[in-house]
Image: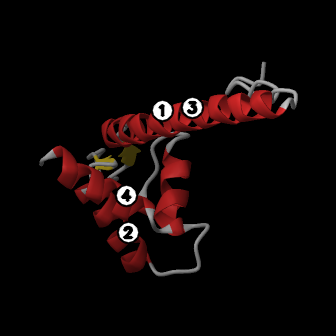
Amino acid sequence: MLLSEQLDATFAALADPTRRAILARLATGEATVMELAEPFAMSQPAISRHLKVLERAGLISRGRDAQRRPCRMEPAPLVEATAWIERYRQIWEDHYERLDALLDELKAARGDSPSPPPPTPDGA
């Protein structure tokens, strides 16, 4: 699958709150379809359809353990999506820093005091 197709599938799968909740549950460890279905007021076939979307996007995989078919989260598509988002976050951060510098220049030209520095992502 091409990167753009993978990103499309990942974001489409993540667009649904039920699928995000399923992924949040799988982040804590493997679970069966029945265990994943427990917190939702929907049928097992409906949960299975959600799982198929997640599986097609590569966000989960299903194993075989005797009679059980445990689902597990697969991190690679989320890593790719995070990298894609991070590129754009950095671009916008750079734009905002340039805007802040320009505003400080304009304030200085008017005799106003400059803006305080923006907060850092780590809160320091």
The amino acid at mark 3 is Arg
Residue 62 against residue 48 in the figure, above or below: above
Residues at badges 1 and 4 in contact (C-beta under 8 Å)? no
Q: Quadrant of residue 88?
A: top left
**Residue shown at 57% from the left, 67% from the top:** 38
Amino acid type, label 1: Gln
Residue positioned 27% across, 58% down in the render: 8
Name the residue that disc number 1 marks: 90
Q: Earlier in the sequence, mark 2 or mark 3?
A: 2
Which label belongs to residue 105? none
Q: Is residue 17 above or below residue 86?
A: below
| Way the structure is coloured | secondary structure
Residue under numbered circle 3: 98
Please identify, in this view, whether the residue under mark 4 or under mark 3 is nearer the observer: 3
Q: What is the spatial separation of the Cα atoms under label 4 and label 3, in whole angstroms?
A: 30 Å
Kindly identify the residue that appears in the image at 81 percent across and 34 percent down.
110
Query: x and y percent of residue 95 in the render?
Result: 52, 37
Residue 16 percent coordinates (x, y): 47, 68
16 with respect to 62 (left or right):
right
Q: Regarding mark 2 in the picture, which secondary structure is present there?
A: helix
- The answer to whether residue 67 is seen in the rendering is no
Q: Nearer the viewer, residue 63 or 40?
A: 40
Badge 1: residue crowd in 10 Å (few <14, some 14–19, many ≥20)? few
Q: CA distance from mark 4 to mark 2?
A: 14 Å
Question: Residue 10: percent from the left, percent from the top?
Answer: 33, 54
Residue of label 2: 50
Frontmost of labels 2 and 1 is: 1
First along the sequence among labels 4 and 2: 4
